[in-house]
Amino acid sequence: MSATSRLRPSLGYGLGLRTAHYQALLDERPKLDWLEVLSENYMVEGGKPLYFLDRIRAHYPLVMHGVSLSIGSSDPLNQDYLRQLKQLAARIEPRWISDHLCWTGVQHKNMHDLFPLPYTEEALRHVVARIRAVQDFLGQRILIENVSSYLTYTASDMSEWEFLRAVSEQADCLLLVDINNIYVSACNHNFDPLTYLDALPAGRVQQLHLAGHSMNGAMIIDTHDAPVIDPVWELYAEALRRFGQVSTLIERDDNIPELPELMDELAHARAIAESVHAASSAATRRLA
Amino acid sequence: MHKLPTLQQLFQNHVLRPHSGHVIEGAVVSDAKATAQTRLDIYANAYRMRLGEALEQDFTALHTLLGDEQFEALCLSYIDTHPSRHYSLRHLGRHMSTFLREHDFYARQPVLAELAAFEWMMVEAFDAADSDVVTLHDLARLPAEQWGQLRFSAHPSVQRLELFWNVPALWNTADQQHDMPQPQRDANALTWLVWRRELKTWYRSLGAEEAWAWHAACAGHDFGEICSGLCRWVDEERVPATAAGMLQRWINDGLVSAIRYPA
Ligand SMILES: [Fe+2]
C-alpha cells in the first residue's frame, strides 16, 4: 500500500475555531466544510470552551491542532499533556491531530513559542523516536507542521525540507504543510519556496495552512493577523499542483474579522483549487 | 558543536535573560539579512510580549489600576520569577497574587494582591468543572425529618475569599469607560464568593453569619450543626428560618451541586 492511499480524503475548506465566532457558528451555521480547534484551549475541566465545542462539533467535522507537544524538546515527553490530548480526542473524535516540528521549552518550562530545531542527524533521530512514541500512545498517525522561523543554527547540516521529509518518512507520520510558513521562512532565510514544496512527499500531505503575516524590518513575522497575501496564494496553487486536493485551512489569531470575511478568503482558496484541478484534469485528458 | 540539550538550554536562557551574556550567538547564523543577535531578539521580544498579553487578559483590573507602564514592569518581573511550567498559558497567572503579596515593592500596596486574587478566581471559575445544581424543587422533595442531617456539596466553580479592599468595585469599573474609584480599605475583611452559573461568572459578598455557615457547609457539617452554630448571631427561635433562607439563596444562586442525607 502506498502512503498516498492511506491519506484521508480532503475535508474541503475550513477555519480555525475562535471564541469570537462561537455564537455565530451555532446561530447561523455558515457553510464551512470543517473547523480546526486549538487543543490546549479545550484541555480544561468545563465551562464555556467545552460547552461550545460540544455543540459546534454536532455540525462540523473537527480536527485538533496543538502547540505544546514540543516534539523536538530534549525534555522527556510530557505524559500529562499526552493524557489530556488523548482524553480530548476521545471526547471530540477529531478527524486527525496535528502539532509542529519545533520545541517549546526545556527543563519543564514552556516558552509558548514554536522554536526551530537544528537540522542534524541527532535531532532527526530524537524527533523520529518521539513522534513514534506519540503515535503509539494516541493509537493514530499525527500530522507534523512546518513552522515559521527567524534563525538557523550553525549546527544544521541539512535543509529544513530535507529534515521534514526524513522525519515524516522515518516516523511514518503525515504532514500539515503551512504555505505561509514556507513563504515566511523562505524570505527570512533566503531560499526558494518551490524547492521546499518539491522536496515534500506528496503522499503524506494531509492538510494545508494558509495565513497572513506582518513585516518587521527585513524579517517577516508569522502573526496570523492579516489576510493571505498574493504570493502566498500563488504558492498555494503550486502546492496543489504537487499534492492534489488537500484539506485547506485559514488561520487567523489576531484582528479576527467576522465570519463572512474569512469565508470570502476560503472561497478564494476554493477557486484557486478548482482552477488548478481543472488545469490538471485537462492535462491528463491530453495525455490520454 | 553543541548537543541538542545544550543548544536548547542556551537558546532558552537567551530568551529568558536576553542581556545576561549567555553564549548562544555563535550557534546561530548571521547573514546579510540579519545578525544572529537580531534573529535571537525576535524570539526574546516575542516571548515577553506573548506572556504579557496573557497576563493582561487575566488581570484587566490590575492593569487599569497600575497603568500601562507599571503593569508592564510587573509582568516582566513576574514572568522572570514565575516562567510558565504548564503546557497551557491559561495557568500563567496563578502565582500573581502571592507574588504581589510577597514582593518588597508591591507589598506596600496590599490592594494589588487582593485584586489579583479576585481576578484569578474569575479565571478559575470560568472553566472549572461542570456540575448539575440542586433546585428548590429538589429541596422541597427531601423528607422533612431529614433536614437536620442534610449535607451539601458546593459547585466545583465556587471559590471564597476575604477582602479588606473595595476590590469588586475596582474590578467592576476596569473594563468600562468611567474612572476607577480610589482603592479603600475597610477595618474588617468581607467574605466574597466567586462562581460560575451556567456560562456566566458571578460574585457576591456574604455577611458574617452566612460566611460562617457556608464555610461550615463546605467543611461537611450538616444542617443541624449549621443551625446550632448560627445561634452565635441569631436568636434561637429565628435560627431555623434564617438557616432555611440562606440555604434557599445558595440554591437559587446555583452554589449547591448536591445534597446528601443518611439513607
Ligand atoms: Fe500553521
Image (tube, coloured by chain):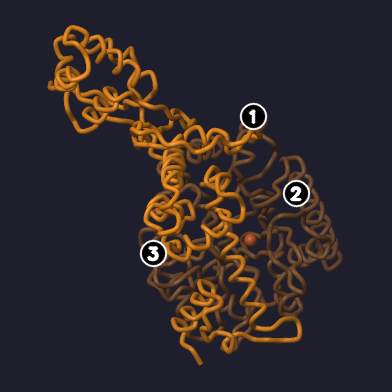
For numbered disc 3, what is the local secondary structure? loop
Reading the image, the residue beneath label 3 is A78
Instruction: Give the position of the C terminus of chain A as an image quadrant.
Output: bottom right
If you read the primary sequence from the N terminus, does the residue marked by circle 3 or circle 2 appear first? 3
If you read the primary sequence from the N terminus, does the residue marked by circle 1 or circle 2 appear first? 1
Tell me the kind of residue under disc 3: Asn
For numbered disc 2, what is the local secondary structure? helix
Residue shown at 61% from the left, 65% from the top: B46
Quick one: A278 or A145, which is closer to the camera? A145
Tell me the kind of residue under disc 2: Leu
Reading the image, the residue beneath label 1 is A27
Tell me the kind of residue under disc 1: Asp
Indicate the position of residue B66 as horizontal and vertical percent values: 56, 49
Which chain wears orange?
B
Could you give the CA–CA distance between mark 1 and mark 2, rounded to whole angstroms?
20 Å
Which chain wears brown?
A
Indicate the position of residue A77 as horizontal and vertical percent values: 39, 68
Reading the image, the residue beneath label 2 is A266
